[in-house]
Image (cartoon, rainbow, N blue to C red):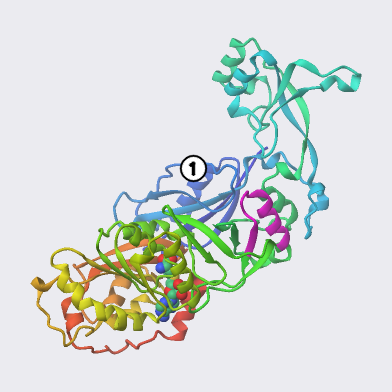
Amino acid sequence: MFTRRLLMTFSFPETTRSAGGPIRERRSESPKDDVQETLVRVAGGMLRSVPRLLALVDVPRRVGVHRLFSCPATGSEERSSVLRVQAVMTDPDLGLYQPPAAVRGMTVLERDAFTQTVVVPAIRIPTRVLNRLVKSLKKVALQRPGLKRVVDDDDDDDEGNETDREHRLLLLDPHSIKSAESFGPEEAAALKALGVEPEIRHYRLKLMYENLKSEEVLRAVLPEGQDVTSGFSRVGHIAHMNLRDHQLPYKNLIGQVIMDKNPGVTCVVNKTNTIDSTYRNFQMEVLAGEDNMVAKVKENGVSYEFDFSRVYWNPRLSTEHERVVSLLRRGDVVFDVFAGVGPFTVLAARRGCSVFANDLNPESYKWLQHNAKLNKVESKVTSFNLDGREFIRGPLRERLPDLIERSGSSPAVHVIMNLPALALDFLDAFRGLLRGETDRGPDGGVLPKLHVYGFSKEDEPERDVLERAELRLGTALRGRCEVHTVRNVAPNKEMMCVSFDMPRDVLYGEDVVEEGCSEEPSPKRLKLEETQE
Ligand SMILES: C[S@@+](CC[C@H](N)C(=O)[O-])C[C@H]1O[C@@H](n2cnc3c(N)ncnc32)[C@H](O)[C@@H]1O
């Protein structure tokens, strides 16, 4: 009997945090009921009412972590009432392929060893109605990568008969069709209308490595009962994995399988450490394919090139880049303090903004300039290779008085600070930044708008990042800022963005560093953040 395997991660962002974390693995013949039942068991009593399961979405073909649904648990708008469930499903055809025992424990990929003959249902269709009927039976036809589902009817060959040219066989999904009675009303009607008997035949089908999905191959190879999740991030031609310890003996085979099964992937790498402390890039090991780390990607319609092993790039930030840049208007001036290879910078420049972009990593600086040229916006981008604090107190400070004065009529000034592990700590660089300059008051120009990123593991991430920003600035922001949740980085870790107009008293006031507000964060805190990203 076909069973579907569910891997569920529960994340209860706020009030029910204690229930978050565990990954549950279940086998179920009725996955939807099973998820509902598990939600009741895990969440009931902790949430004010049990969440209603809205939908269980099948995840065909690709196996990975998919957010299947998220549902308001209580109907209230509070963040605390949002329950997220993620699930990984194995392929519904799992029951079809029973791998040869010899492949278990294989560390060097031998593709031929996966070949297996299985018996599948088929229906004999006269060639004259073939196209029409194949269309009508699409839902119950066998679907496998690289597999023809219409085959010759040469059943009688053993007896010396010729292949029947008048008929073909349509292979059917054994999970949908077990007998002539399995066809649904629409399919049965189509068969009747075209005069085809719903007689089921058995066809011996040779399944080969090419017809298997990566999940099936890995499940066959890795020790039984262990998780084979083969999710990866795609950065151009590079598939970027984060293998667990039990998968490491099979790392090269896993890499090869991922490459074989994902067209366009020509290099598979595994992260070998946590994110690097300063430049936010990963150390990585090539598992399979070419040793070429220069990736070409497209994000929000913009092309970027960079050496993925030496700079920071996160394909999950495209929506955030787009969101912030959509707030900008043509002619605005942007200071991108931690610019990386330019995803905010280039997009903003293409929107008609003038951008001053900075990154401490010489390699990011190099690719930032390259990407500005690549997208023909180099005249709009001035780049720097400085520490963020030096950039704020140097190039930004030099230009600010003028820009504030001009801003009364048109351009706004935006400062983007995306280094979530540390950016909030850099805010004190703005204290007293314009001390000595004439403050002409609200009529003397508009002050810059900041968009500052921070990670939070607190139960109330909005409040946490806001308080940290206030502490660093030495002034209250409540009621005059917006806090946006960017994404859930880990089960108990959120990436947040605080946006606010820089308060006058901060810029023109005294530069007093509050107690508990040292220039650099403690190494202990930094380390904690890094292991989680
Ligand atoms: C999280 S990445 C963000 C890159 C880019 N803005 C984006 O959204 O993808 C942070 C960047 O800050 C740079 N960085 C780290 N420490 C820095 C510092 N002290 N001063 C300036 N840049 C720094 C890193 O090299 C990295 O490129």
Residue found 29% across the figure and 52% down from its top: 76
Label 1: element kind: loop
Of residue 428 and residue 36, the one placed in the foreground of this image is 428
191 sits left or right of 518 in the view? right
In the figure, residue 223 lies in which quadrant? bottom right
Q: Mark yes or no: residue 225 visible.
A: yes
Amino acid type assigned to the residue bearing label 1 in the image: Leu
Residue 261 rendering spot, x and y as whole percentages: 66, 49
Q: Mark yes or no: residue 11 visible.
A: no
Residue found 53% across the figure and 73% down from its top: 275
Mark 1, residue position: 56
Residue 294 rendering spot, x and y as whole percentages: 57, 64
66 up-or-down from 500: above or below: above
Image quadrant, ligand 1: bottom left
Magenta run includes residue 254: yes
Residue found 79% across the figure and 16% down from its top: 164
Q: Which residues are magenta?
A: 252-269
Crowd band around label 1 with a 10 angstrom C-alpha radius: few (<14), some (14–19), many (20+): some
Residue 154 rendering spot, x and y as whole percentages: 81, 22
427 sits left or right of 259 in the view? left
299 up-or-down from 372: above or below: above
Of residue 319 and residue 396, the one placed in the foreground of this image is 396
Magenta run includes residue 48: no
388 up-or-down from 170: above or below: below
Of residue 51 and residue 119, the one placed in the foreground of this image is 119
Of residue 38 and residue 346, the one placed in the foreground of this image is 346
Quadrant of the image for the N terminus? top right
